[in-house]
Amino acid sequence: KAGVTQTPRYLIKTRGQQVTLSCSPISGHRSVSWYQQTPGQGLQFLFEYFSETQRNKGNFPGRFSGRQFSNSRSEMNVSTLELGDSALYLCASSLAQGNSNEKLFFGSGTQLSVL
Amino acid sequence: AQKVTQAQTEISVVEKEDVTLDCVYETRDTTYYLFWYKQPPSGELVFLIRRNSFDEQNEISGRYSWNFQKSTSSFNFTITASQVVDSAVYFCALKEDNYGQNFVFGPGTRLSVLP
């Protein structure tokens, strides 16, 4: 069974641009979450999508948005990039069978550098 | 508010030594879930162990064991007979009792196992 796939693996952008990151969850997984990882702030929850709807949202500005498609694949978009958006963006999927203690399965992330 | 603290930023041990990673958490929930994840240099977080707040039984799984103490809000993780392949960043995480997948992660402990 294929794991969580994130593309691209690396991305370099300049300030003011926008970027779209893609995540394909494990087959059968219905929930997709996004996390931002930086040396200073650590791992921070961005948002979660379930059945094409945003179910939870972290404390990030509106420049960060996402969506989920009917096949559970998800995209994350960051508009008007700032230097501080440079980070490893991790996607995670889970079965979402209704158990609160479900574990997350992570992808290898997209390393975004904003110049 | 929920919070996870990992006081050890970096630990170095020599192969075959035992090593314990500390985790202290804060939550007002009476039901919650605790996890340990490992992040090797490849980037993806790998699930290690999970514990429910209502189950304080400590267990051993292969070379891994954990000590969950509700009275001190601690969830420590021990690797017995460490190996070089155990070198990674280890994250402790806390999740509320809901169907969302918004985990709160600690800052991580970088473990280096030297040959």
Image (cartoon, coloured by chain):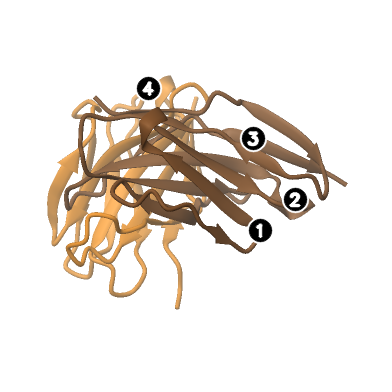
Chain colours: A orange, B brown
Number of the front mark, 4 or 1: 1
* Alpha carbons under labels 4 and 3: distance apart: 28 Å
Which residue in the structure is indicated by mark 2?
Answer: B82
**Neighbours of disc 4 within 10 Å: few (<14), some (14-19), many (20+):** some
Quarter placement of the N terminus of chain A: bottom left
Q: Is residue B19 above or below residue A68?
A: above
Q: To which chain does the residue with label 1 belong? A: B
Residue shown at 34% from the left, 52% from the top? B55
Q: Picture coordinates of residue B70 (x, y %)?
A: 36, 36
Whether label 4 touches label 1, CB < 8 Å: no
Closer to the N terminus: mark 3 or mark 2?
Answer: 2
* Alpha carbons under labels 1 and 2: distance apart: 8 Å
Badges 1 and 2, same chain? yes
Q: Is residue B107 above or below residue B67?
A: above
**Neighbours of disc 1 within 10 Å: few (<14), some (14-19), many (20+):** few
Whether label 1 touches label 2, CB < 8 Å: yes
Q: Is residue B34 left or right of residue A109?
A: left
**Could you tell me which secondary element the residue under label 3 belongs to?**
strand
Residue A80 vs residue B46, the one in the foreground: B46
Q: Picture coordinates of residue A98 (x, y %)?
A: 17, 63
* Alpha carbons under labels 3 and 2: distance apart: 14 Å
Number of the front mark, 3 or 1: 1
Which residue in the structure is indicated by mark 1?
Answer: B63
Residue B71 vs residue B84, the one in the foreground: B71
Which residue in the structure is indicated by mark 3?
Answer: B110
From this viewpoint, which residue is outermost toward the bottom? Answer: A1
* Alpha carbons under labels 3 and 1: distance apart: 18 Å
Which residue in the structure is indicated by mark 4?
Answer: A82
Closer to the N terminus: mark 1 or mark 2?
Answer: 1
Whether label 2 touches label 4, CB < 8 Å: no
